[in-house]
Image (cartoon, rainbow, N blue to C red):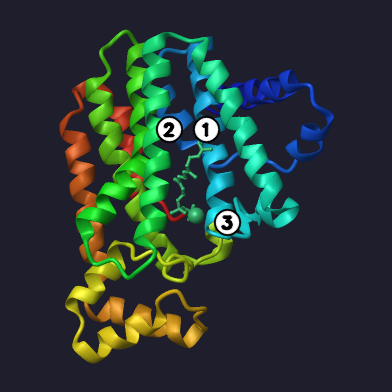
Amino acid sequence: MEDRLGLVKSTIKGYFDDLNNPIFDTFRDSFSFGKMLRSKLIFAIAPDSTLSVRLCAIVELIHFASLLHDDVIDNSLVRRGKASINAKYGNKNAIMLGDILYSKAFYEISCMDSRLSQIISNCVLKLSLGELEDVSLGESFNLDSAKYLQMIEHKTAALIEASAECAGILKGEKGDKYRIYGNSLGIAFQIIDDLLDITQDEKILGKAAFSDFKEGKTTLPYIYLYQKMQENEREQLLSYFKQDLDSKDKDWIKAKMDKYNIIEQVKEVVSNYGNKALNVLDYEDSNLALIMKDMLDREF
Ligand code: FPP
Ligand code: MG
């Protein structure tokens, strides 16, 4: 797998070379590759081929472009264990670099089979709508778990689902089974991400911890917590919304999460999505079952 991920990285470097732009070149060394979950997923489905490597490179570029914009929108200063691009070079550069990466990815996907370019371009539309929904939900304390699930399905699951479906097509299949699997994997991935924001620390996460609530994101643990709380506790939780919390406030929230068994309740939801994904798989898809398991067990 490492060899194949190396090929994806060198393909991306080749795409950067194609840009042939000295200004762009001053920024490119600050980019870092993340966990490359989407590439691992594509390689678990698609045959070993140049087309699969190119699909991975395109998907990673789109993912990275979306994070460049997301960090501006969320005003996040740390990403992948380093200062975010907006923290290092300012919002204007982060936005323009996101546009460049996305445009290059768009050009490259347009050179591939039109079924792939349609799936990928449609999923970018969904993830952009998902980000819009995320920002809109963040304007007030959101108690509607259906709205939260719809938003993460767009913001996160769309690209994971599209990656799996395109990989299925490269394998010569229709891709439906992989799309359904990718959808549940993507939703489970984001719920875990939102859980880790509360339970994990910055060093391990590679980005700021306990930042969702401050950014106005009422993620599933907060929705469930509010539902279970007594009136005086609810008032206190609401007073923390969008505020800079000190360690005492964070400990209070964590203690209430413990008191009401919220983490377990959220893990149960995640595990239901996991089972939904596993149910569509066949005997020969054991590597996809393993990806799902690793994702459920992940700590960052
Ligand atoms: C991270 O969410 C954000 C996303 C998964 C999607 C962001 C999408 C866009 C900005 C629109 C598309 C833009 C382009 C250029 C293709 P998060 O903030 O919950 O996660 P985090 O904690 O990792 O920041
Ligand atoms: Mg963010």
Task: Identify the disc placed on residue 206.
Answer: 3
Within 10 Å of disc 1 (Cα), the crowding (few <14, some 14-19, many 20+) is: many
Whole-number angstrom distance, CA of label 1 to CA of label 2: 8 Å
Q: Residue at x 33, y 13 (%)?
A: 169
Whole-number angstrom distance, CA of label 1 to CA of label 3: 20 Å
x and y, in percent, of residue 175 in the image: 27, 18
**Residue 44 sits in quarter:** top left
Q: Is residue 258 left or right of residue 205?
A: left
x and y, in percent, of residue 280 in the image: 17, 29
CB atoms of marks 1 and 2 within 8 Å:
yes
Mark 1 secondary-structure assignment? helix
Disc 1 target residue:
62
Q: Residue at x 44, y 65 (%)?
A: 212
Above or below, 161 relative to 74: above
Q: Is residue 277 left or right of residue 182?
A: left
Task: Identify the disc placed on residue 124.
Answer: 2
Of labels 1 and 2, the one closer to you: 2
Within 10 Å of disc 3 (Cα), the crowding (few <14, some 14-19, many 20+) is: some
Above or below, 259 relative to 158: below
Give whichever of discs 1 and 2 has the lower sequence position.
1
Q: Is residue 279 visible?
A: yes
Of labels 3 and 2, the one closer to you: 2
Determine if the C-beta at disc 2 is less than 8 A from ligand 1: yes
Callout 2, which amino acid? Val
Determine if the C-beta at disc 1 is less than 8 A from ligand 1: yes
x and y, in percent, of residue 86 in the image: 67, 53
Q: Is residue 3 visible?
A: no
Callout 3, which amino acid? Gly
Mark 2 secondary-structure assignment? helix
Give whichever of discs 3 and 2 has the lower sequence position.
2
**Residue 105 sits in quarter:** top right
Q: Is residue 228 left or right of residue 26?
A: left
